[in-house]
Structure formats: structure tokens, C-alpha cells
Image (spheres, helix red, strand yellow):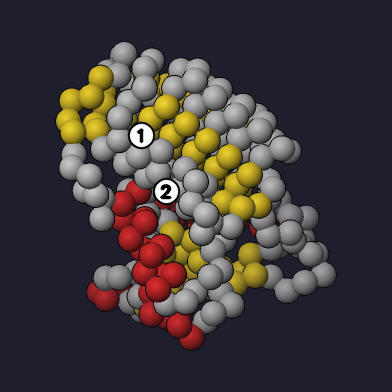
Amino acid sequence: MSTACDYYVAMTPEYDSNALRLPLVIVGPGGLGRELHQLVRDINRSAGGAEPWDMVGWLDGNAVTHGTQVHGLSVLGDLDWLRDHPNTYVVVGIGAPPTRRKVVEKIKALGHTRFATLIHPTAVIGDEVEIGEGTVICANVTTTTDYKIGCHVLINIMATVAHDDVLHDYVTIAPAAVISGNVTIGEGTDLGTNATVNQGIEIGAWSIIGSGAVVTKALPANCTAVGAPAKPIKKRPEGWHL
């Protein structure tokens, strides 16, 4: 787990109903980014009038989109916009772990440190857990207890995370994936839709696990694995994600 990552217990930040709403921008107005906007709306609607987030707009590296509107919010510019807005929270709405990591590193290089952690109100979150900054947990995710989730992790709708799991930074868990207990998933690994990881399995960093795969044995880093049981079909060179 990255030592540069800030961790929180369950929900972060702690919202004060008497405080001003926290300004937030989403990087990437594509499909996932728009889903994150809906997630923010759902958080605000569930807050009983004390809406925690003030959605300011979008950031996008494609200059063609600048000045346009998505979901009624303006595309404000690229990441450089953050230089003049150090108190604005940011979350990266990009599903691919290598790209998400690159964007986060660019944001950090600007000296920006405010990353939003977003947890949908329908998600079941345990008490004795650690969840890193910039992580997104979507609607109807079920988690149990004593797990650690790193920074800038995406856990999509209806996925399951069980006891004593460790999900390292930049992991993506696709919809309805099931992770049994005592599983470790390495940094930047992408677990496909409806994939299942059996009890006690370790998956190496920066691997891609196909949709519907059933992982019954440990998988190495930098591989693509598919099938039931899941077997590696491709090996990538170390550092391919950089």
C-alpha cells in the first residue's frame, strides 16, 4: 500500500452541517465522470438539506470541450485550472487504472492535495476499515469489515468486498464483481464485470482480469487473465502502465 496515501475511516471528509459546501470538480466528463456526478447528486440529496458538495464543473484535457456544458455544468479547462483553485476538491472520473494514475500524478505535480473520497449512500461500509483519498464507492456496493482500500480506487455498482481484503491504489473493480475474504489485489489491477475472486487469493499489480472470470489461484503481476478458472493469456512487460 502506498505510504504517500492518506487514509480515512469509512466516510471522508467529516461533514459539518453548519459549514459551507465543499467545492468539487470532476476530471473527465465522459461516461464514468457523468456517473460520478450522479453519485455526488445522490450524496447531496441524502444529506437532509446539509448538502456537502458544491459541484463547480468539469476538467478535461481536450481543449475542444472547454467552455461547453455537460449535465448543465461547464467544462472549466484542463488540470492547470487547479493552480488557481487550491481549495477545490477533485476526483478523477477515468476508469482505466493507468490513465487514472497518470492524471493523479499530474495533479499532485501541480501541488494540489485535495482529493475527494465519494461513497454512495446505498453502499454498505464497515466500521473497522481504511479507505484512501480519491476513492469512489458506487451505488449498492456491499463491503464487510477489516479491509483496506487504497487511494484512487474505483469500486463500481453492486460489487462486493469481504473481510480482510486489501485493494491497493488505483485498482478498478467493475460492476457486480465479487471479492471473497482475505484477498489481495495489487496496485492498478482491473477486475472485470461479474468476475469472482475466491478466498485467500493474491493478484499481482497492473493485471487485467476479464469479465466473468473466476480466479481460483494466485495470478502474477502485469498479466491478462480470462476464463473459469482464470488463466493468464498475456504477459506485459514491467512498467507497461507508465
Q: Residue at x 41, y 63 (%)?
A: 104
Residue 106 can be seen in this image: yes
The numbered dot on residue 145 is none
Disc 1 target residue: 204
Q: Nearer the viewer, residue 195 or 31?
A: 195
- Please state the horizontal and vertical placement of residue 77, each as a whole percent of the image: 37, 78
Helix, strand or loop status at disc 1: loop
State the residue in front, 226 or 219.
219
Q: Position of residue 184 (x, y in %)?
A: 47, 31
Mark 2 / mark 1, whichever is N-terminal? 2
Q: Which residue is mark 2?
A: 170
At a point 65% along the width and 29% down the height, the residue shown is 144
Compared across the picture, whether 204 is left or right of 34 comes to left
How much space separates mark 2 and mark 1, taking CA atoms? 13 Å
Foreground residue among 217 and 66 = 217
State which quarter of the image contains the C terminus.
bottom left
Left or right, residue 137 beside residue 236:
right
Residue sitting nearer the eye, 45 or 189:
189
Q: Is residue 158 visible?
A: no
Identified by mark 1, the residue type is: Gly
Q: Quadrant of residue 212?
A: top left
Residue 176 sits above or below residue 153 on the image: above
Give the class, few, some or many, for how many residues have Cα within 10 Å of label 2's Cα (few <14, many ≥20).
many
Q: Is residue 225 above or below residue 188?
A: above
Determine whether the residue tagged by mark 2 lies in a helix, strand or loop. Answer: loop
| Residue 205 image point, x, y percent | 35, 39
Residue found 68% across the figure and 59% down from its top: 13
Amino acid at pointer 2: Tyr
Give residue 186's position: percent from left, percent from top.
Answer: 41, 38
Q: Name which residue lies at 35% across and 34% down.
A: 204
